[in-house]
Amino acid sequence: MTIAQVSKLYGLSSDTLRYYERVGLLPAVGRTSGGVRNYSDEDLRWVEFIKCMRDAGVSVEALSEYVRLAQQGPGTAEARRRILIEQRTDLEKRMEEIRKTLERLDFKIANYDSMLAAGLKAGNVCADTTDKKSCKDG
Amino acid sequence: MTIAQVSKLYGLSSDTLRYYERVGLLPAVGRTSGGVRNYSDEDLRWVEFIKCMRDAGVSVEALSEYVRLAQQGPGTAEARRRILIEQRTDLEKRMEEIRKTLERLDFKIANYDSMLAAGLKAGNVCADTTDKKSCKDG
DNA sequence: ACTTGACTTTGAGTTAACTTTAAGTAGTAT
DNA sequence: ATACTACTTAAAGTTAACTCAAAGTCAAGT
């Protein structure tokens, strides 16, 4: 598979794919006789894995370390496991932040909804209670 | 409240608080006669709100637009509501990405666990099946 | 009066993660 | 053979979100 095909398939730009390879986020991809990248099935599995992790916000640094270890063979399994657990902890933290913020946004949006409904019904402009003095959503 | 106290209270550096104010993420904070920032209760509520949103990953740009509108009074409520809904949608998307990735990490970690357990029991180094050919966690 | 320390502003520097540019090559179509 | 397009590398540029540095001010303590 060429870089353009992989790019299309996974929604990563060719530039990004080359960048990932350069910084060790993907193991070295094979080349044709002319020096053109030719992605193997295993390369594709790596691309898909990396894309999934990056989409969730796992850092390039953590992933390149993981890839580096994976290429050193089975002796590094313990270290790789530690990286994955660290990243899981991190993602769980982030998920909790998002959950809290979603709750808060829902509350604020509900406030706007009733505010706007009241304002429209009365045909006038009501006071802004969502961000000022009477804000109770902290 | 001084900037140092606010900084301590919310875990944001003074530099960050000044930066937030500069880019309009916080409404202009009042000053003492000497020109020193003096945070009011309302300022603190904004700081807390902004910190919550930033911790969840809401962009500085979206937030500064929201703050700009909030300062223009009640006429902008509809526009502000739209921003909040947009951000909620965005956070929900991100949460789903994280959820998927957590699932996958759990699977991979479980693989490492059994792999390492087997390896240790047998007292040898087992093959790496988590990232190579027999990887079934895609 | 003088030092100290926390503040002020403006502007430059940093980091992560790409993204673009420049200059060149390889393979295909006419 | 020549033009075209997609590729190659190395290096510089970009963006978001801070973070730091320089030079100066202000209020409190000695």
Image: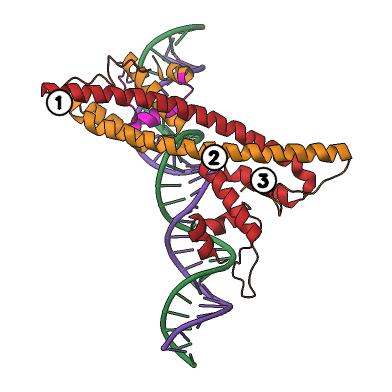
Chain colours: A red, B orange, C purple, D green
| Amino acid type, callout 1 | Leu
The range drawn in magenta is B10-35
Residue that carries the numbered disc 1 in the rendered image: A120
Q: Circle 3 sits in a helix, a strand or a loop, which is it?
A: helix
Left or right: A92, with A131 as reference point: right
Percent position (x, y) of residue A8?
48, 60
Distance (Cα) linking label 3 and label 2: 22 Å
Residue that carries the numbered disc 2 in the rendered image: B100
Q: Which residue is rendered at x = 63% and y = 60% of the image?
A: A41
Label 3 crowd (10 A; few <14 / some 14-19 / many >=20): some
Q: Is residue A100 magenta?
A: no
Output the chain of dot 1.
A
Q: Which mark is residue A13?
A: none
Percent position (x, y) of residue A50?
58, 49
| Amino acid type, callout 3 | Glu
Number of callouts: 3
Output the chain of dot 2.
B
Residue that carries the numbered disc 3 in the rendered image: A65
User: Label 1 near label 3: C-beta < 8 Å?
Assistant: no
Q: Which residue is rendered at x = 16% and y = 23% of the image?
A: A119
